[in-house]
Image: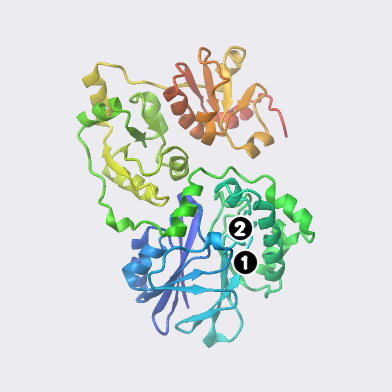
C-alpha cells in the first residue's frame, strides 16, 4: 500500500493518494484544484489514477474531483446518501455509493460508511490491505473526525442559509460518532483538515491519529450524553467565511474546470489608473508594510500570506473580473493559484509594484499611507480615538482591550454606521496582520484617520496593560 498526503496550508486541507503497489492502481481522496500535484505524485510512484472520490460536498474549497477524473479517465465515486437537497448534480463517469458499499483499488478494499452530521451526505472510507489480512487499517474521515475535534454541524445553516438544520445535524453527528467508536482502537484516522480550518473549532496539528487515542483525548468522542454533545459542538464555532455558501453550491452542481482558463497577464502600469477610475476591484497582495508605506486609494489590501485565500473569499465578489498587485510574476502566479482553490477565477490581470508609483506620477496625487501606532502611544490617546477589534468572537471573549469595540473583520464593512468618521480610528487584532486589512477597508469606506495597532493585543499584553475578560 502506498499512501501520500498532500496539505494545502492556506486551507488547512489534506488530500490523499492511496495506491496498491502490486497492481499500480491508485485513488485520490478529497482533491483540491491543484491537480498537477496528484498527477506528478502518481508519475513519481509509478501508479495510475483509476479512481477519484470525496467524502462530502465541500464548503471550504472548490473540489478538484471532477477535473482530476476527467484528466485521468478515472471513475468518480460520489456519495448518494443524504436528502434530495444535497445530491450531486453532475454525472460524467460517476459511480454513486451508499453506506455498506465496497470497491477495490487493486488489492485494497474501500468500504463506504455513511457518517452524517457535518453534512447529510458525508461518508468516510475504511481501507483494508487485503494481502495483509482482514483487519481494517485506515479510515479517511473527511470532515467527520479530526485530530482533537469533529466536523461542525452548523455550516448548512450559518453559511448556506438552511434554517433549522444545525441542531438536527448535531444529533446526527452524535449518533454517527457512537457507531464509529465501535471500530478497532488501532484504526488510523486520516482527516481532511488540520489546525486553522474553519470546519471545526479545536483541530490538532498532527497529520494522523488513531481511533483509540481520539477516544481518550478528543472532547467530542468522550461525551456520552447527546444533549451535552449538541450544546458543546454548537458553541464557540468560528465565523464561517462568506465564500462557504458559494462552495457548497458550486461543488454540488459541478465545479468549473480550471484548465479552461488562461493565466492572467502582466498589465502595463498605465492601465492601473484607468481601472481605479472605473471602480474596478484591485487587490493589493503586497506585504502589509508595503501597502502601509504607500498604496493607490481604492485598492484593497489582502497580503499574500497564510490568510490570503480566506480573506479574499470574504471580500472579493464571484463572477466579477478583478486585478492583482503583486511583488512579481512568481507572487502573481502564487496568488492566482491560491484564489483558484476557492473558485475566484476571474483574475483579469496583474500589476507589478512599479504601477503603484506610476499611478502617483501619472495622476499627480500622493499615495495613501496607513499610520502605525504602538500600544504606548495608543494609551496616551485612548480617550480620543476609537479602537476597533477585528478578531473573531471567541478571541474577543478570551480577552480584549477595555476601551475597544468589536467589529469582526469579515463583516466590518457592514458594521460601520455607529462609528464617528471624524474621530481617529485604531484597528487592532491579535498581532497586526488582520488589522492591516481592516485599515484598508475603513480607508475605502471614507474614514480619513485610520491607524494600525502594531503588534495587536499581543504587544499590548506584553507591555503590561490591562485586558478585560479571561
- Left/right placement of residue 326 relative to residue 301 reads left
Residue 226 versus residue 17: which sits nearer the camera?
Answer: 226
Q: Are marks 1 and 2 in contact (CB under 8 Å)?
A: yes
Residue at 55 percent of width and 55 percent of height: 194
- Left/right placement of residue 183 relative to residue 99 reads right
Q: Position of residue 193 (x, y in %)?
A: 54, 57
Classed neighbour count for the residue bearing mark 1: other residues with Cα under 10 Å, few (<14), some (14–19), many (≥20): many
- Left/right placement of residue 435 relative to residue 67 reads right
Q: Is residue 326 visible?
A: no
Badge number at residue 118? 2
Would you name the residue on which mark 1 appears?
A: 115
Residue 449 versus residue 157: which sits nearer the camera?
Answer: 157
Label 1's element? loop
Classed neighbour count for the residue bearing mark 2: other residues with Cα under 10 Å, few (<14), some (14–19), many (≥20): many
Quarter of the image where one finds residue 171: bottom right
Label 2's element? loop
Q: Is residue 348 visible?
A: yes
Residue at 66 percent of width and 68 percent of height: 211
Q: Position of residue 273 (x, y in %)?
A: 25, 26
Amino acid at each position: 500500500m502506498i499512501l501520500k498526503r498532500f496539505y494545502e496550508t492556506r486551507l488547512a486541507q489534506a488530500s490523499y493518494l492511496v495506491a496498491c503497489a502490486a497492481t499500480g492502481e491508485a485513488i485520490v481522496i478529497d482533491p483540491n484544484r491543484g491537480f498537477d500535484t496528484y498527477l506528478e505524485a502518481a508519475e513519481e510512484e509509478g501508479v495510475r489514477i483509476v479512481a477519484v472520490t470525496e467524502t462530502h460536498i465541500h464548503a471550504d474549497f472548490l473540489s478538484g474531483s471532477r477535473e482530476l477524473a476527467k484528466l485521468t479517465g478515472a471513475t468518480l465515486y460520489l456519495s448518494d446518501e443524504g436528502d434530495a437537497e444535497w445530491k450531486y448534480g453532475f454525472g460524467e463517469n460517476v459511480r454513486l455509493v451508499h453506506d455498506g458499499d465496497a470497491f477495490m483499488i487493486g488489492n485494497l478494499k474501500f468500504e463506504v460508511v455513511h457518517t452524517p452530521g457535518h453534512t447529510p451526505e458525508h461518508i468516510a472510507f475504511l481501507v483494508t490491505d487485503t494481502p495483509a489480512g482482514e483487519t481494517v487499517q485506515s479510515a479517511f474521515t473527511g470532515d467527520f473526525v479530526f485530530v482533537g475535534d469533529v466536523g461542525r454541524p452548523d455550516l448548512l445553516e450559518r453559511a448556506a442559509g438552511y434554517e433549522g438544520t444545525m441542531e438536527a445535524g448535531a444529533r446526527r453527528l452524535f449518533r454517527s460518532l457512537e457507531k464509529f467508536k465501535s471500530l478497532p482502537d488501532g484504526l488510523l484516522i486520516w482527516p481532511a483538515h488540520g489546525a486553522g480550518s474553519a470546519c471545526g473549532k479545536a483541530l490538532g496539528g498532527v497529520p494522523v491519529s488513531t481511533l483509540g487515542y481520539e477516544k481518550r483525548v478528543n472532547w467530542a468522542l468522550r461525551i456520552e450524553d447527546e444533549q451535552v454533545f449538541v450544546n458543546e459542538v454548537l458553541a464557540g464555532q468560528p465565523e464561517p467565511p462568506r465564500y462557504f455558501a458559494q462552495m457548497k453550491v458550486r461543488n454540488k452542481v459541478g465545479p468549473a474546470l480550471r484548465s479552461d482558463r488562461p493565466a492572467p497577464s502582466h498589465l502595463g502600469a498605465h492601465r492601473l489608473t484607468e481601472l481605479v477610475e472605473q471602480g474596478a476591484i484591485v487587490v493589493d497582495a503586497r506585504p502589509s508594510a508595503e501597502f502601509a508605506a504607500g498604496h493607490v486609494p481604492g485598492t484593497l489590501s489582502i497580503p499574500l500570506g497564510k490568510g490570503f485565500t480566506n480573506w479574499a473569499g470574504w471580500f472579493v465578489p464571484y463572477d466579477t473580473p478583478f486585478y492583482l498587485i503583486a511583488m512579481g510574476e512568481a507572487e502573481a502566479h502564487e496568488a492566482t493559484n491560491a484564489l483558484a482553490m476557492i473558485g475566484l477565477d476571474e483574475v483579469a490581470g496583474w500589476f507589478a509594484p512599479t504601477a503603484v508609483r506610476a499611478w502617483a506620477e501619472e495622476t499627480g496625487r500622493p499615495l495613501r499611507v496607513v499610520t502605525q501606532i504602538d500600544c504606548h502611544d495608543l494609551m496616551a490617546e485612548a480617550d480620543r480615538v476609537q479602537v476597533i477589534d477585528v478578531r473573531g468572537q471567541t478571541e474577543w471573549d478570551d480577552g480584549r482591550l477595555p476601551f475597544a469595540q468589536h467589529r469582526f473583520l469579515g463583516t466590518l464593512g457592514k458594521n460601520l454606521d455607529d462609528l464617528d468618521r471624524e474621530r481617529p480610528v485604531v484597528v487592532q487584532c491579535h498581532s497586526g496582520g488582520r488589522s492591516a486589512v481592516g485599515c484598508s477597508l475603513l480607508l475605502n469606506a471614507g474614514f480619513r484617520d485610520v491607524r494600525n495597532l502594531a503588534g495587536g493585543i499581543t504587544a499590548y499584553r506584553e507591555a503590561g496593560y490591562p485586558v478585560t475578560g479571561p
